Image (spheres, rainbow, N blue to C red):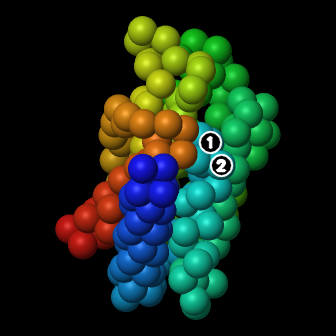
């Protein structure tokens, strides 16, 4: 029984990795076709979105840089997120996501950015922002910003993986529509 459970977990893990790779590859094709560069600003995913993007051969043509701003201090120092925004609304807020997006564009040569901040657990949640709450943002120069909030379930790894899948899927959709 343990072997069957392990086989199912392994199969799901591999299929999620394949899905992430295909999404990153598709994103690369869209960015190259539009002559755009991308930057990522990540908190709860710890650079997993940037890692997925750089798994694709040739990604140096369209990936400029990734900011892993796990702490509030990093968000302030690297992206210019306002301390007052963090103190008032927290790291998992639409205002913070917007500031992360703007900071990633201002501190790179990218034309398109993805920002992710959330609560991957197992602790850190609250009634207003339970574990699994993740905020997302996408910015295409000059000022086309989209934000979204999702509530994912599962353990820390699953929440982070679902966040990367959602971020890349939505980036592809937004680029396809513009």
Q: Nearer the viewer, residue 158 or 68?
A: 158
Circle 1 packing at 10 Å, graded few (<14), some (14-19), many (20+), is many
x%, y% of residue 173?
26, 64
Residue behind mark 2: 46
Q: Is residue 64 visible?
A: yes
x%, y% of residue 105?
58, 57
Q: Do labels 1 and 2 touch, CB within 8 Å? A: yes
Q: Looking at the picture, does residue 58 appear above or below residue 151?
A: below
Q: What residue sits 65% from the left and 34% below the top?
A: 81
Q: Looking at the picture, does residue 56 appear above or below residue 156?
A: below
Residue behind mark 1: 43
Q: Looking at the picture, does residue 102 appear above or below residue 20?
A: above
Q: Give residue 66's mark.
A: none
Q: What residue sits 60% from the left and 64% below the top?
A: 50
Disc 1 to disc 2, C-alpha distance = 5 Å
Of all residues, the one furthest to the front in this rendering is 1
Of helix, strand and loop, which one carries label 2?
A: loop
Q: Nearer the viewer, residue 137 or 169?
A: 169
x%, y% of residue 46?
65, 49
x%, y% of residue 101?
53, 48
Of all residues, the one furthest to the top in this rendering is 127
Residue 54 vs residue 75: left or right? left
The quarter of the rendered structure image containing the C terminus is: bottom left
Quarter of the figure with residue 156: top right
Q: Is residue 138 visible?
A: no
């Amino acid at each position: 029984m343990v072997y069957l459970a392990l086989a199912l977990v392994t199969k799901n893990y591999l299929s999620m990795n394949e899905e992430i790779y295909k999404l990153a590859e598709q994103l690369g094709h869209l960015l190259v076709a539009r002559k755009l560069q991308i930057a990522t600003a990540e908190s709860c995913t710890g650079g997993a979105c940037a890692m997925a993007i750089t798994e694709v051969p040739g990604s140096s043509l369209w990936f400029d840089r990734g900011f892993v701003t796990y702490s509030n201090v990093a968000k302030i120092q690297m992206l210019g997120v306002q301390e007052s925004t963090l103190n008032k609304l927290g790291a998992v807020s639409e205002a913070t996501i917007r500031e992360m997006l703007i900071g990633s564009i201002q501190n790179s040569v990218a034309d398109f950015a993805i920002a992710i901040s959330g609560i991957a657990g197992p602790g850190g949640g609250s009634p207003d922002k339970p574990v699994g709450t993740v905020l997302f943002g996408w910015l295409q120069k000059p000022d086309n910003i989209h934000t979204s909030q999702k509530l994912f379930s599962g353990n820390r790894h699953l929440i982070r993986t679902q966040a990367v899948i959602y971020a890349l899927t939505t980036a592809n959709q937004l680029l396809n529509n513009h």
